[in-house]
Amino acid sequence: MNPECETRLIRLKRGRTIESISKLESVSKTGMSIYLPPGSFYGSLSLNVDTRLPEQLMKTVCKSSTGFALFLNIEPDSIQFTLVIPPFPVHAKAIMEYIDIQPLLSLICKDYLAGIILVRMGSFAVGVVRGETVISSKISGGCIHARHRQGGSSAARFARHREKQIEQFFTRACGYAREHIEPYANELDYIIYGGAWTTINAFKKQCSILTKITTPELVPLLDIGEPRQQVLEEAITLLYSSRVAQWRQNAGI
C-alpha cells in the first residue's frame, strides 16, 4: 500500500451511493467482496490478496458502529478498492471471491421506519420517517437564557431561573416526542438523535418515554444546526447517507 496515499471518506447521499457501487459489478471480471459487521476484527482476515487499508481508514473502520463493506476490482496491474461504511449495521460477516453488491444494496435501499429527535437548547424537532418521507413531525422552540457570567446571589437566582426554563423546555419537547414517536415505538427499526451531546443526554434523562423505547440507536448526528424544518430534512438525508472511499493499489505492492 502506498504510504503516501491520502484517501478520504466522502459522505454520499443514498442515490449517489447506489449509483457509485452499481458501477462495480459492470467493470470487474475478477474481484472480492468483504462484509464485516460492527465489532469485527479486520486484521484477523487471512486472504490471498493484500487487503490492508490506509492507516487513516483503518482507524475509522475499527470504530464504525455499522461495520463496512470492501470491494476489490482486481486488474492485471492494479487493484481498485471501494470502501463503504453504510448508515445501517451490516448484519453478517461474508467474504466472496467476486464482486457482490446485493447485500449492501439491500441494506441501504430499504426504507426503514425511523424516529428522529433533534434537540439543542431552545429548539427541537421530532419526527418519524419511512425512508426519506416524513410520516409525522413537530418543530418548536422555547426561550432559554444564556448562562450568567457574573457571580453573587443574582447569578444564583439566574441559574435557578435558567434551570426552570430548561426543565419546561424538555417537558414540552418530551410531550411532542410522546405524541409523534410513541405511537410507532413498537414498529421502529431505528432511532437517531441529533444536536449537542450533553443536551441529548440531559433530555433523555428527563424524558421517561425515551428510556422505554428499546429500538436500536444509531450514532447521533452531533454536527447539525439549530433544529428547523431545513435541518430536519438535512438530518433525514444524513440518515440514509454512506461514507465512501476509493483508491488504487499497484499489483505486487
Image: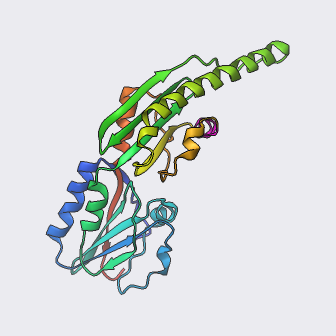
- Asked whether 248 falls inside the magenta stretch, the response is no
Q: Quadrant of residue 32?
A: bottom left
- Residue 3, position as x, y percentages in the image: 44, 69
> Which residue: 82% across, 18% down?
151
Which residue is the extreme one toward the top? 154
> Which residue: 36% across, 36% down?
234
Q: Quadrant of residue 231?
A: top left
The kind of secondary structure the magenta stretch mainly shows is helix
- Residue 189, position as x, y percentages in the image: 40, 52
- Residue 209, position as x, y percentages in the image: 55, 39
Q: Is residue 218 left or right of residue 97?
A: right
- Position of 69 relative to 253 (above/below): above
Q: Which residues are magenta?
A: 198-205
- Residue 141, position as x, y percentages in the image: 50, 21
Q: Depth check: 175 or 194 in front?
A: 175
Q: Depth check: 181 or 127 in front?
A: 181
Task: Name the colour scheme.
Answer: rainbow
- Position of 94 relative to 87 (above/below): below
